[in-house]
Image: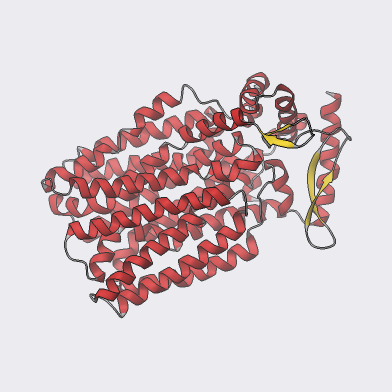
């Protein structure tokens, strides 16, 4: 049929191996068409369509960045003043969203397999909007927590489904960039939250934080409209045996009926349509809980990168940046918010560097640059708070270190974490395994966020960021040993990267059998 396997050659490099018949066709997950010279070229119409779908699917991330992270960093100061909450209640309010979102992520895997990728995106927006409205109108801390819990469930759905959806509709040559869109929108939401903090901080304390939270509900209206225009994932449609609908979506995506038919055949093979009974009798969660060696390696990579994204302390840097700058020596809310806006611009700006290079130089080089840069920045921030606190040089170093940390995060670990989690798992496990990785991400975020103030009080803020720096060192090692390069690979090809030589030979035989069955049918 085509090139569907990858093996390691004698020089240690990965090379593609032909399987099945000798019929030549365009790579299934690419967005390439033949020119008159026989050379592949991009299809601009297809790119525009998929680009628009990726943007609409990422809108939930604006809510995540704005309501969960950006606006809360400033609103919490006024909530504490207005509702007279304690430091422990403050930690709970900030961190509980990440903890509770694990339930949304766990339910999200099952829900997205049941009702589809795009309607799960809509469900996430409805739940988050409800929680946000309750928070904005909350008369007490208890009601505020109820709204925050609902927001957490909505975020749990949103963080795992958008990358999965985008990965399943994107061509291989642009999948890394497109799957990074949710991270762009998270950063944009965070920046809007910072600007909102500054813009409304002059209002009375019992009103300003409510306005800050209420503004974040606006993107939900756009999401509601977008759901009626974006298509369902063709891979999910194949899993539901809705082949004709999947074919129509693929024709819209590729703008080429022949290529759409070829992609459909490969998706059917990957989905196990030719051997459905085998997968119906094997529960997805059983396969995840008792994984084969290749699946175990995928889970280590997918869940590990998700956890490292959070345990290196990025959320605390963003949540508590105004307080960090005050510890460094900045006085007054306005000055702290101004410095925080600089952090938001930096975080948003550098995500575009990742978008430009993720499909050109690959995931792994960006991850190296990211984790090494974060390590240097975290140690520098620790130094500025421990040795140069309240000195002009210390304030400058603290601002540069925080900006360096979020810039390094945005270049690699931020977006690529979600890209890898959405592309390394086989189709039959993708939604549930991605949900498991999102659970690890949310739990790590919640634990770090809820304990930051208490830990900082015991070992100082400088000591806390020194520990984050040490963890970031381990993240560099994890990238080196556990993360393969997936640039340019189709979703179906990536599975083979996690197989050793013996497993690869067995996989080649099985795929050949499946191809022959598909050709007969």
Query: How was this image coloured?
Result: secondary structure
Q: Is residue 71 visible?
A: no
Asked whether 6 or 130 is in front, the reply is 6
Q: At x 56% / y 47%, what residue is drawn?
A: 419
The residue at the far right in this view is 22
Would you identify the image quadrant in which residue 510 lies?
top right
Relative horizontal placement of residue 19, taking residue 112 as reference (left or right): right
Q: Residue at horizontal 60%, vertical 54%?
A: 363
Q: Position of residue 265 (x, y in %)?
A: 75, 29
Query: Where, quadrant-wise, is the C terminus in this rendering?
Result: top right
Q: Residue at position x 29%, y 75% from top?
A: 393
133 sits left or right of 259 in the view: left
- Between 121 and 12, the one lying in front of the other is 12
Above or below, 404 relative to 108: below
Comparing 351 with 438, the one in front is 351
User: Is 257 in front, or is 275?
Assistant: 257
Q: Is residue 505 left or right of residue 430?
A: right
Q: Name, please, the residue furthest toward the front.
A: 37
Residue 264 appears at what percent x and percent y? 71, 28
């Amino acid at each position: 049929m085509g090139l569907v396997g990858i093996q390691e050659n004698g020089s240690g490099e990965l090379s593609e191996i032909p399987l099945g018949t000798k019929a030549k066709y365009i790579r299934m997950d690419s967005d390439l068409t033949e020119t008159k010279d026989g050379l592949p070229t991009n299809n601009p119409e297809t790119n525009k369509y998929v680009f628009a779908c990726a943007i609409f699917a990422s809108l939930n991330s604006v809510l995540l960045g704005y309501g969960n992270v950006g606006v809360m960093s400033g609103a919490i100061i006024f909530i504490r003043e207005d509702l007279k909450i304690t430091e422990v209640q403050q930690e709970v309010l900030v961190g509980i969203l990440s903890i509770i979102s694990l339930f949304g992520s766990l339910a999200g895997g099952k829900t997205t397999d049941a009702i589809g990728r795009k309607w799960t995106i809509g469900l996430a927006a409805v739940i988050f909007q409800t929680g946000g409205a309750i928070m904005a109108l909350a008369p007490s801390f208890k009601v505020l927590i109820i709204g925050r819990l609902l927001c957490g469930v909505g975020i749990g759905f949103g963080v795992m489904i958008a990358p999965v959806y985008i990965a399943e509709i994107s061509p291989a040559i642009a999948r890394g960039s497109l799957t990074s869109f949710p991270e762009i929108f998270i950063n944009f939401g965070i920046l809007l939250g910072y600007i909102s903090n500054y813009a409304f901080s002059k209002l009375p304390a019992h009103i300003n934080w409510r306005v800050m939270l209420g503004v974040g509900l606006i993107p939900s209206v756009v999401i509601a409209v977008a759901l009626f225009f974006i298509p369902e994932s063709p891979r999910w449609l194949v899993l539901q045996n809705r082949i004709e609908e999947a074919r129509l979506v693929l024709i819209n995506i590729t703008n080429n009926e022949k290529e759409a038919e070829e992609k459909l055949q490969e998706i059917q093979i990957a989905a196990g349509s030719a051997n459905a009974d085998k997968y119906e009798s094997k529960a997805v969660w059983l396969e995840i809980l008792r994984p084969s060696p290749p699946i175990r390696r995928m889970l280590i990579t997918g869940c590990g990168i998700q956890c490292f994204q959070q345990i290196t302390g990025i959320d605390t840097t963003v949540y508590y940046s105004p307080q960090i700058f005050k510890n460094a020596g900045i006085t007054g809310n306005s000055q702290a918010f101004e410095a925080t806006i600089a952090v938001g611009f930096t975080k948003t700006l550098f995500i575009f560097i990742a978008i430009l290079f993720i499909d050109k130089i690959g995931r792994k080089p960006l991850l190296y640059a990211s984790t090494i840069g974060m390590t240097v920045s975290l140690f520098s921030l620790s130094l500025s708070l421990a040795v140069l606190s309240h000195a002009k040089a210390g304030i400058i170093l603290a601002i540069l270190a925080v900006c360096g940390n979020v810039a390094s995060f945005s270049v690699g670990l931020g977006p690529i974490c979600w890209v890898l989690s959405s592309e390394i798992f086989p189709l039959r496990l993708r939604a549930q395994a991605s949900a498991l990785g999102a659970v690890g991400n949310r739990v790590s975020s919640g634990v770090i966020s809820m304990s930051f103030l208490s830990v900082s009080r015991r070992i100082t803020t400088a000591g806390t960021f020194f520990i984050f720096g040490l963890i970031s060192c381990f993240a560099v090692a994890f990238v080196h040993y556990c993360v393969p390069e997936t640039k340019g690979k189709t979703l179906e090809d990536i599975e083979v990267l996690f197989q050793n030589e013996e497993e690869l030979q067995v996989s080649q035989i099985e795929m050949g059998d499946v191809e022959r069955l598909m050709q007969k049918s």
